[in-house]
Image (cartoon, coloured by chain):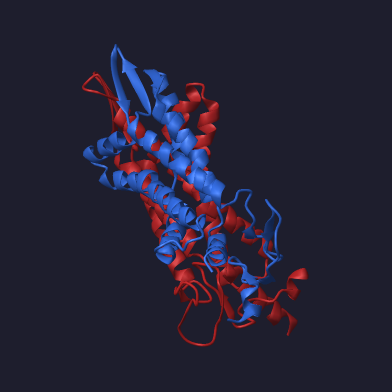
Amino acid sequence: MTTEAVATAADLDIVACHCCGQVCQHAAGDICCVRCGTHLHRRKRDSLSRTWALLLAAMILYVPANLLPIMRTGSLFSSQDNTILSGVVELWRNGSWDLAVIVFVASILVPLLKFAALLVLLISVQMGKDWRTLGRARLFRLIENIGYWSMLDVFVVTLLVALVHFQKLSRVDPGPGVVYFAVVVVLTMLASMAFDPRLIWDTAAVARKHADD
Amino acid sequence: MDTSVANLVICEHCDAVHRRHELARGEVARCVRCQALLYRCPWLDVNSMFALALAAAVMFFIANTWPIVSLGLNGIHRSATLWGAIFAVASDGAGLVAVLVALMLFFFPLLQVILFGWILGFLRLHRRPPGFVPIMRILTAIGPWSMVEVFLLGTLVAVVKAGSIFDIILQPGIWAFAALTVLLTLVASFDLRRMWVLQRERCA
């Protein structure tokens, strides 16, 4: 493996400032970046427990986010509750299959992918596996980069609430589901920010060392 | 100052240590171990970036003062601005959503435009930007939470959804948002780490 030859900052007793990137000597104890004064640490603090907490909270709130209506459309004679899934189905039936696919990916696939990916990352790191390190590193970068597109449905509801407001004739009101859904997206973003991808490589290196002994 | 340390770059994603190389325009440096982006040399210099930030500021103003779309039903028309939408959601009992939308679509993009403009404006005159360190901290923190591009797609979805029942008239705001998305993406793609290097080189 080519990865054997790589020197890590932890080996060399140096650390990069997470604010400005400045490389600093890291002896024991508390130190601050020589350039910007940010408090330095080698790894994100309590990364695993913070990620678990945020991820579990997001997964619990994901249930009401999908079951409760995200908006209520009403006209003179009837009113109808829309969930995230029914919104996708409605787009599909009206012939906008392309937008239906986009909303399905952003609102349903991306959050589920994020849950699954973070679970895989957390569990594999905690079990100390030397398993597909590059693949897991890529998986983490993927969910970090696409996660915020899940806010799509929240913005759709916001705009429709403002636009469809014709007194009693026709109106759209936000449902409780949209609040839960917005919180879920924020929590999953915070969870992926709390996860420290360096742990993937740390634990893999330890596992390899054990295998060699 | 230890010069041997100053020439090193540490991968944020896997902690691998690299020696810094000069890059040509448009080139990127990736980590040898995990292939994460280490640093890049942008296509545009400080003056062009400053021009983009100014253009983004103008577009931001238009995008937030003009309505985005109008709906028509039996001759009654109703149009919405971004702030109109935020207030509508807040008054209908989803206050938390209103706060999040206001932050992600108004305050964070606004801060990005102003703070990038401020820093680049001073750097192009070879002067140290006042408040440089706290501003860089703010820019690093708000980057992932600025979501104008998601809103643009959201507008498209909302228009298609409403279009099956109502008459739709696109207003200037939506074009301004489209332009702002492009400009803000270009401005925000500027490597923040590079700003520290520029700041040292230009204001020595």
Left or right: B60 as drawn, with respect to B21: left
Q: Using the rendered image of the protein, determine whether residue A53 is visible from the camera's viewpoint.
A: yes
The mark total stands at 0
Residue at the spot x=47%, y=46% of the render?
B53
Q: From the image, state the color of chain B.
A: blue
The residue that appears at 51% across and 67% down in the rendered structure is A20
User: Which image quadrant is residue A60 in?
Assistant: bottom left
- Residue B1 image offset from top left, x and y in percent: 58, 81
Q: Is residue A11 left or right of residue B168?
A: right
Give how far across and how far down residue B111 sits, in percent. 39, 51
The quadrant of the image that shows the N terminus of chain A is bottom right
Between residues B102 and A21, which one lies in front from this camera angle?
A: A21
User: Residue A213's image quarter?
Assistant: bottom right
Residue occupying the far bottom of the picture: A28
* Residue A198: x %, y % from top left: 58, 69
Chain letter, colour red in render = A
Residue at the outermost top position: B74
Note whether residue A83 is visible: no
Q: Is residue A204 left or right of residue A1?
A: left
Tell me the quarter of the picture where residue B157 sits.
top left
Q: Nearer the viewer, residue A202 or A176?
A: A202
- The image shows residue A143, relative to residue A129, as above or below, that is above
Q: Position of residue A177 (x, y in %)?
A: 34, 42
Residue at the outermost right position: A1
Residue drawn at (43%, 48%) of the image: B113
